[in-house]
Amino acid sequence: MKAIAILPGTPGSTHLRDVPRPSIEAVEEGRGVRVRMIRAGLCGTDADLAAGEYGVAPPGEGFLILGHESLGRVVQTGPDADMPSGQLVVVTIRRPGSSAYDDIGRPDLSTDPVFIETGISQAHGFMAEEVVADARYLVPVPDDLEPVAVLTEPLSCITKSLRQADQVQVRLDLWRPRRALVTGAGTIGLLATLALRQRGLDVTTYARRAAPYRNSELIEHLGARYVSAAEMTIPQLAERDGPFDIVLEGSGAPALLEPSVAALAPNGVLALFSVTPGTRPLTVDVARLNQSMVLYNRVIVGSAAASWDDYAAAVATIGRAESDPATRGWLAQLVTDRIDGFDADAIARHLAGGEDGIKTTLEIAGRG
């Protein structure tokens, strides 16, 4: 079958590859499920993989099939797989390793030095005609969400960050956030703005580009404010619109870390879920940062990958957006570019950068 793969660690190695169809019998205890892929999303992680920044092939193989943002339909099930044929699904990314957290079904919290992540590290991804997975890693999706459900995986990063923020804030005995700041207005920033607005928070989204443009208009459609770095700094923004009970940092810009902490309200939480590859040397006033954290009971929490429950919460968030007349169709506007079939050259060009869209998808099954 066809698949899009890279040679991990080799820049510019994105290619079309013919690979054997996976075996449903390879999944233990009869829980195997064959999923025919409909589409896969592309993101900055895929770009970093294609650039050779990181990535680990499965044991014994010299290549890695890309794709961690998935949408497919069940076409075959093992005897003990609790998943009906024909069900629309997304597939979670993390697979169990050897840590205690893996043993209790929380691979998203794994302490292994190298994680097992489909399409990223040690496990093939979803840019293939078919995949086989354990039924435990499949998240059902209602059929009416099919046009936008490929956004489930990036949205699951948001739902996990918000869940962890809620759990951390149990320390306060009283957690009633009113104002939020989102840094970054790409796919993640847009989805974070949506999730926070669904919670009823007053949201400001901060990014580099001057308004108006597509992303700023999408943010304002949600009733949030868009502010460009060309207009004001985060300290100026905090003075005007803050302080913020929660800051979701999705820009990947290390220079925003210290001002984001300072923009927090007392008892506030800064949730980090972006990863910047490589190194970015930066001078930070550690004494002032320490004072800011300690004196005002602030917290920084990091969040990687997502659990099955976070994926399910993301599907619910998408469902609410599509059922609300005020936001119905909003998510569809995030998918700005589609690549038909297994066009490895088009995928490589996209991952090399230069496009002005928001979310690009690989249409594996063809457009309906």
Image (cartoon, rainbow, N blue to C red):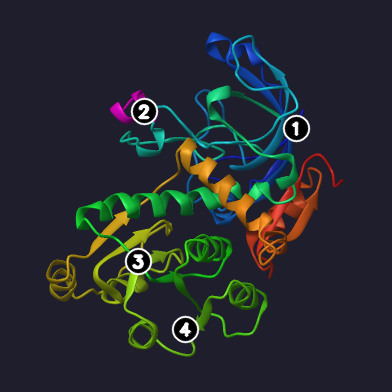
Q: Are marks 2 and 3 in contact (CB under 8 Å)?
A: no
Quadrant of the image containing the N terminus: top right
Task: Provide the residue span drawn in magenta.
Answer: 98-105
Question: Looking at the picture, does residue 229 appear above or below residue 224?
Answer: below
> Which x, y percent locates residue 107?
40, 33
Q: CA distance from mark 3 to mark 1?
A: 44 Å
**Residue positioned 45% across, 38% down in the render:** 307
Q: CA distance from mark 4 to mark 1?
A: 42 Å
Task: Let me know if residue 104 is in the magenta part.
Answer: yes
Identified by mark 4, the residue type is Ala
Q: Tell whether 338 sits left or right of 236.
A: right
Secondary structure found at label 4: loop
Residue under numbered circle 4:
229
| In this rendering, the label closer to the viewer, 2 or 1 | 2
Residue under numbered circle 3:
177
> Which x, y percent locates residue 181?
41, 72
Residue under numbered circle 1:
129
Residue under numbered circle 2:
102
Secondary structure found at label 3: loop
Mark 4 or mark 1: name the one nearer the start of the chain: 1
Q: CA distance from mark 2 to mark 1?
A: 29 Å
Q: CA distance from mark 3 to mark 4?
A: 24 Å
Secondary structure found at label 1: loop
Q: Tell whether 175 sits left or right of 178.
A: left
